[in-house]
Image: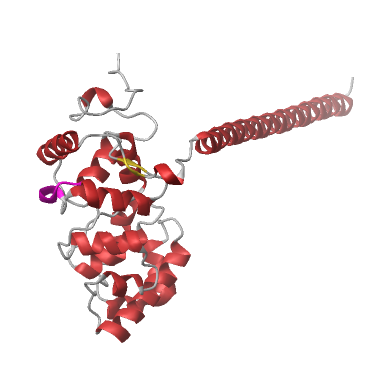
Amino acid sequence: MSAKKTAKKKKTTANKKTTKKKKKTTANKKAAKKKTTANKTAKKKKATANKKKTAKKKTTANKKGRAAKKSAPKIPKSKVGPGPLPDDAIERIYDVLAETITPVSDLEYTTAFELLVAVVLSAQATDKSVNEATRKLFPEANTPEQILELGVEGLTEYIKTIGLFNSKAKNVISLCEDLIEKHDGAVPETRAELEALAGVGRKTANVVLNVAFNQPTIAVDTHVHRVANRLQIARTNTPRETEDVLLERTPERHLLEAHHYLILHGRYCCKARKPECWRCGVREDCPYEDKTPAPA
């Protein structure tokens, strides 16, 4: 065989090998692509399944919560008022709470205005989330004039991690306008004037009057309402009814700090779903029947 034919044969063989190699590479690429697509599809299906599972759990939890709320018996109007817990037991309970609880707000503030803003921001939000926001806000703006200068958009940047931040930003700006126009920038010391401010309701006014101005008011939130009824100090349906009973039944020497004792006891010990009865200092006088046993 001539050298020319041999070279041609070698070239043909090489070309066949190259073609075969290309086909193999293409097949491998197709297989890899198919595998990647299959993995992506599997991941997507898994993510969708997890989402559905989470949504189902959430829906079930919400249904249970609504059912529990719905099934909670409403006290007839004729029976609303003081609960059956005796006055001497109430005195002992407050005495114990006074010994074990430091009556200081979880909100961080240095002035009456900072406290007012913090309480307005804390509606339907945790004190922790409010503190995280105000630690950045107050060093930059902690007077009505300074916050007004920020405007709604500027204030929103500081409080956007708090629930309902858009409406709260508008309320705080309106609040600052009211303070400047009606009170020369000072926080008023009467309930009527406080409740006339934008975003300030009875509970907020009570907190400011009590904490900033040492007035014997009792702000009733969900914790205070629950604890007062669980201890049977009160038999009430609404925060206002609870407030009226607590003002009537709280020993005078504890009246100034009662709000702190009840809210902090409810937040950290007498919890809504699973009260920590085994470590509760007032369990001997507590008539709550479904006491939680100590964890194993």
Image position, residue 178 (x, y; %): 34, 80
Residue visible at 43% across and 74% down in the picture: 152
Residue 171 part of the magenta segment:
no
In terms of image quadrants, where is residue 169? Answer: bottom left
In the rendered picture of this protein, how many numbered marks are placed on residues? 0
Residue visible at 85% across and 24% down in the picture: 6
Residue lying farthest to the front in this orientation: 78
In terms of image quadrants, where is residue 283? Answer: top left
Left or right, residue 50 beside residue 87: right
- Foreground residue among 79 and 72: 79
Q: Is residue 20 visible?
A: yes
Q: Is residue 266 above or below residue 13?
A: below
Residue visible at 34% across and 52% down in the picture: 129
Image position, residue 104 (x, y; %): 17, 51
Left or right, residue 119 beside residue 96: right
- Foreground residue among 90 and 71: 90
Left or right, residue 174 beside residue 35: left
Q: Is residue 120 above or below residue 173?
A: above
- Foreground residue among 218 and 73: 73
Q: Is residue 257 above or below residue 114?
A: above
* Quadrant into which the N terminus falls: top right
- Foreground residue among 9 and 272: 272
Residue 253 part of the magenta segment:
yes
Q: Is residue 42 above or below residue 69?
A: above
Image position, residue 194 (x, y; %): 30, 71
Image position, residue 253 (x, y; %): 10, 49
Q: Is residue 127 visible?
A: no
Residue lying farthest to the top in this orientation: 296
Main SS, magenta residues: helix
* Quadrant into which the C terminus falls: top left
Q: Which residues are magenta?
A: 250-254
